[in-house]
Amino acid sequence: MASSTANVAQTWESSAPLSSRQQSVLDLLSQPCARFPFDAPANASGGARHRGEPATSQGGHDGNEASASLERKVSASENQVFTSSEEFYKWFAEVEAMYLSVSESKFLEYAEDLKGHSASLEAIIGQCDDALAQYDNLKLQQLNVRSKTQSVQAQCERLSREREQLEEFANAVKSKLEFFDELKRIGDQMGAQQHHQGSAEDYVDSLGKIDDCVAYLSSNTQYLDAGSYLAKYRVLQNKALASVKQFVCSSFARATEEVQAAQSKPSAENDTSSSATGIETALLYVKFKAAVPDLRRVIGAIQGRLNRQDYSRLMHDLQGFYGERRVEILSEAVEEHLVGYQSSNELPMLLRLGCAYLIQVTQMEYQLFRYFFPQSDPQVLQVVVTPLCTILYEIVRPYFIAMYDVSGLCAIVSILKCEILEGQFRGERAEQLQAMRPVVEEILADAQERLVYSMQHYIRDEIAYYAPTAEDLCLEPPPPEEKKEEEEKKGGDGKATTSSGAAGENGGAEQAKATGSADLANLYPAVQNTLVCLSKTYGCLELETFGGLAQECVQYCTEACIVASQEIAKSAGLLDSQLFLIKNLLALREQLSLFNVDFGSDETELDFSHMRDHMRRILRGESSLFALGSSNAVFQLLGSARPRVSRMRLDSKKELEKRLKTSCESYIMGVTKLTVEPMLSFITKVTATRVASTKKPLKDHAFATPSKLVEIVSGVNASLEGPLQETIGRMGRYLDSPTTNAVLFKPIKSNIAEAHGQIARLLETEYDQETIEMVPLMPPPKLMAILDGLA
């Protein structure tokens, strides 16, 4: 077709050539035509199919026919000759119209198809609208049904709640009525228990129900007849408590009878006492526990309600009855054991064995008591233990009353205080033995009271009113050989005492402690008795009590030493008496430092001495009892003449130290006078002469002549070599401590040296050289050598 078109164009060009103007116009027309979508019919139909445009079979057939007609017309135009442009334009218009009809037919057909589809869709939309309308109607119906269902459900729930409330109300009414209805049931149950003894569970249940009913009615007194029912329950509760008490007491009584029957069997069969097997056997405890197996639950229920007064009173009665039954079982066996100890042992061993036995009994009773009364105070166990321990107390008390020996009583107190109370009643055993402690403390108090009484008698007889013998007042110490023999003998006695027993060991240890630095054998017997008494009783009494007795003892001992020294002064001289007093008071003070106690006491007195004048005026009639005003005798007595209260502090240890100091000063002055008395008299006369202010020279006085001075110095020199040495030697023999001797001799030496120094100064100032050479005054180095040799 392209070749034919080209031929037509060539034919046109050769037949009718166009001018340049026509050619330019044609070019202008060809430009828009070049942009026109002019495709082949086949391509157009293929493109339509490619785009997926709908086409019916009829449309496709018509399109093919139009395309064929268009091809035929174009083919026919190949040989057609156009004579003018009009023909060409006409032909071109026809071809263009045919082409347009061919290209637009498919769109028209597609539009027709779309119209058909649109109608179908409108029908479908109508059906959908109908379906939606029906759906909306169905939804409205559903909402109506739901609202009706919800209302029905709400009514059902309301009815259900009302039913539950009614059921709760009915149950509440029923539960409240049960507290009223239980009265008859519990009464019938307790009536049956009175005829036939019930079990422990029955009593516990009855008590629980009654308590609940009483508690409820007590808190809801506003109910009708609550007061009358409460009173009936109170009566029923008292009956229940009485039944429980009877049940428990009868169980304990039955157990007691079984144990006593078992105790009597050995006596009937073997003709031996029940105590032969001992209190430690399982007879008195295991059998008693096995005889009452159900009581723990009943007693536990009672202990859980002890905050109420009636239950507390019931528990107290049950524990008292339990204690009586246990005492009834144990008293005979315990008494037989203790009496057996009494017949074969002395008091110290009797106390040890008896307390050890009672400790064992108390521990076993504590375990049994805890089994039945687990929540009770162990102090309640005293109802059992106290009567048993009282048996021992009644056995040992006559021994205490008959004892006057301080050493024996100290041993008893030491056993009770140290071995038993402090040794046994401590640690884990303290709670178990708590019930036994009061009786042991009572025995200890009686022993201490007897010890105080015996100590007072001992102080009075052996210290305050001690009558010294001639041997006691003899100051001559034993020779060294005899002293050594006495020490060896004392050592042998100490060994014998050590083997005598624990009490002797304690007493010997305390005595050795109190007399470790002093030899008691060389002291005055009153001092010996004082130190021995204090050393034995220290630690056996309370410090306050011991302090009062020690103060009295030291006071009487000091007075006894003073009296003895006065007797010695009459027979042996003042220096010997002072030496005796220093020796004993010094030893007493040294030993008192070992006792950590106050030796003082405060005393209060009423002073009536100033009332004498008022009484005399009343008796003489100077003051009238019937006068009105301040001059009345009674008013004066009640006013300025009333008794005066005077308080004073008496410290026997300070008085002892004061007396010792005075004795030492007197002894020092006595030894000084014994040695340099002539020099001291001479110096006194010289001082008096100088005070008189006489112009006469000293050597011209009759008492101060050179011959007199020679006589004085010679006498002093003789005293230094004779009496002073003897006196210092005697002091060294009596006072064993070199330190004490040095302390006493130091002021004596100082006084002697001072007297010699004053005489030497007088010689230098008042006498000539010839007199100085004539007087045999010792030079200071020689004098100090002699004095140091004496020390």
Image (cartoon, rainbow, N blue to C red):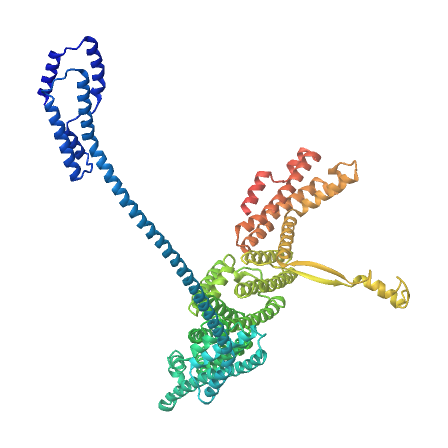
Q: How many marks?
A: 0
Whether 41 is drawn above or below 495: the answer is above
Residue found farthest to the top: 20
Q: Is residue 690 left or right of residue 81?
A: right
Whether 204 is drawn above or below 696: the answer is below
The quadrant in which residue 607 appears is bottom right
- Residue 152, position as x, y percentages in the image: 43, 65
Q: Using the rendered image of the protein, determine whether residue 252 is visible from the camera's viewpoint.
A: yes
- Residue 555, position as x, y percentages in the image: 63, 62
Q: Using the rendered image of the protein, determine whether residue 381 is visible from the camera's viewpoint.
A: no
Give whichever of 742, 337 is nearer the camera.
337
Quadrant containing the N terminus in the rendered view: top left
- Residue 710, position as x, y percentages in the image: 67, 42
Whether 291 is drawn above or below 362: the answer is below
Give whichever of 102, 121 is nearer the camera.
102
Q: Is residue 585 left or right of residue 328?
A: right
- Residue 365, position as x, y percentages in the image: 44, 76
Give whichever of 232, 633 is nearer the camera.
232
Which residue corresponds to the image point at 57% horizontal and 38% vertical from the top-left?
781
Which residue corresponds to the image point at 57% horizontal and 71% vertical from the top-left?
449
Whether 748 is drawn above or below 593: the answer is above
The quadrant in which residue 557 appears is bottom right
Give whichever of 12, 380 is nearer the camera.
12
